[in-house]
Image: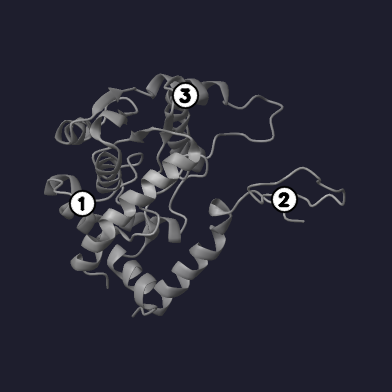
Amino acid sequence: MTNTDELQTLLPLVCDWIRDRMAQSGGSSAIVGVSGGKDSSVTAALMVRALGAEHVLGVSMPDGTQHDIDFAQGICTHLGIRCKTVNIAPMTSAFLQVLEPDADDSYTELSNDTRINLPARVRMTVLYALSQSIPGSRVINTGNLSEDWVGYSTVYGDAAGAFAPLGGFTTDEVISLGRLLQIPEHFLVKVPEDGLTGVSDEEKLGFTYAALNRYIRTGHIDDREVKEKIDRMHRASRFKFQTMPMYPAPFPIRAKDIANIYPW
């Protein structure tokens, strides 16, 4: 498994990568959705290390009353970044109201998955709305490798962003990075939950992050059923992280495709 010395060596390289990605995107400042958990806290801290606190905005987005909202404001205070709070409850309520099925609809009720994933998509809409109103700002993804590996994210919700500094790090590595960045422990060791249902991540997943992280880094896992479940979730969720497929129309593209997006 990854040790602290390796992460210490990687830390300045991650910051260089962040600055490069920001420059390539034409941006100059970061917007981070903050919950006060390890992922958003470490992401915000990396942005501060790479860009400076004056170039980072933390956005807290409770859905009504949220029991741990003080953590979100607390990490912003600790990092010395600006913090904006946007209560998304009126937005999610409005969505649910207008989506209530009519007699001629093909659905009779909104699914539980719809209700669970809606706040994540509303939050990302808020972040991008702010980004388009703040010149040069970019929305930063806060996802980690462990959750992404099994698709534990919402398409066009928390899976979105300009780039993902933590996308190659497992949950335990994120915690270690946080300690190297001198983030207080209470932001790093909260029981992970989705912030929507109040159920812990591990309860929903059906296996521990320790088992998942070991499998990712070593290829070994003790429980065959857990291995099969992880593999199944990984295969089923790859579409979330791939560029949208485009039909290769058999007509020439003569313009210079500098990003090589149209390779056919």
**Label 1, label 2: how many angstroms apart (C-alpha)?**
39 Å
Dot 3 or dot 2: first in sequence order is: 3
Q: Which residue is mark 3?
A: 129
Kindly give the residue lying farthest to the right in the view shown.
251
From this view, report whether residue 75 is shown above or below residue 211: above
Which residue is located at x 45 percent, y 60 percent? 150
Q: Quadrant of the N terminus?
A: bottom left
User: Which picture quadrant has residue 64?
Assistant: top left
The percent position of residue 237, horizontal first and vertical second, equals 53, 57
Q: Which residue is mark 2?
A: 262
Q: Quadrant of the C terminus?
A: bottom right
Side of 231 relative to 209 (left or right): right
Are dots 3 and 1 in contact, CB under 8 Å? no
Which residue is located at x 47 percent, y 45 percent? 154
**Label 3, label 1: how many angstroms apart (C-alpha)?**
28 Å
The percent position of residue 212, horizontal first and vertical second, equals 35, 67
